Amino acid sequence: MMSLLANAEAFLLNNGRLLERKRFSYLFKNGSRDAVLTALKAYQNADGGFGNALEPDKRTASSQPIDQEMALRILDEIGLNGQVVKDICDFLQTITTPEGGVPFVLPTVSDAPRAPWWNPESDVPPAALNPTASIAGLLHKHKVAHPWLNKATSFCWQKLEAEQNFSEHDFICILLFLEHVPERERAGKLFKQISDKIIQNTALDPEAEGYVQSPLIYAPRPNCWARSLYQNEDIDAHLDALSQKQQEDGGWAISWPAVSPGSELEYRGVVTLQALTTLKAYGRLA
């Protein structure tokens, strides 16, 4: 009988994008870092930013803020490439609002099919923690020095210390920022202030359906800050459920409506790798 990992590889070989296939090879088979970077750079535009449906739920070729986050998350897996990171930061400077952050989505997304949540709220959208905080957190993690990061960090602190209402997805971004921003005492204090709200936004039932955030979304690694918010039995139950949710074709399903059959397969490749890396981090892969 094929193992969970072998079944997942078969799914990616049959259905995944070249990018996810190369990421799998790098993460689980000692594959080439350069092959991942080459596949990733295919999504980069002349403006230095990433687009071209790197995030598959919007099909625009234009560079979008979320695509910069996704590119940086992949670079985080393989080790940052200095020139690519500079390209991203230079692009971010061109879309940063006077507040110092980047919007959730740019109006240029409207030139192609997209999920309804990617509809821009206005022609001049405001800056948002999602994805500014995630991007800033990833750059701080690798001690990147760029003028954009200074403005973005100030924006994140201002929003975090002034607001009380954050969405369940905001917390993913906030946690990444707080784990890596240099002001450690300030970050720890704010983490304590929002801990109860993170728990309240967590779906503790492993069988919860729909677009919900499980403990493993907020704590994808045993050494991350949010892990301290959950009981061992909750983490174990969700790890068991995550393993059991592998589909017959070897991949994991998405928990939201797909834009199209093609984009669904693309995103299933992304979430399949996410499931595998979480299971690996917690020692659940043989």
Image: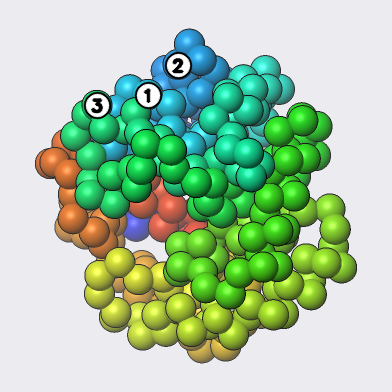
Residue that badge 2 annotates: 45
Nearer the observer, disc 2 or disc 3?
A: 3
Q: In the rendered image of this protein, does residue 95 appear above or below residue 199?
A: above
For the N terminus, the quadrant is bottom left
Residue that badge 3 annotates: 111
Q: Is residue 110 left or right of residue 154?
A: left
Going from N to C along the chain, the mark reached first, 2 or 3, is: 2
Residue most extreme to the left? 261
Can see residue 8?
no
Tell me, for residue 62, which label it has, or none: 1
Q: Secondary structure at mark 2?
A: loop
> Looking at the picture, which amino acid does disc 2 mark?
Asn
* Near-viewer residue (250 or 151): 151
Query: Which quadrant of the structure image shows residue 39?
Result: top left
Q: How is the image coloured?
A: rainbow
The answer to whether the residues at label 2 and label 3 have Cβ atoms under 8 Å apart is no
Cα separation, mark 1 vs mark 2, equals: 8 Å
Q: Secondary structure at mark 3?
A: helix
Going from N to C along the chain, the mark reached first, 1 or 3, is: 1
> Looking at the picture, which amino acid does disc 1 mark?
Ser
User: Residue 60 in the image: x percent, y percent?
Assistant: 29, 28
Q: Residue at x 64, y 22 (%)?
A: 90
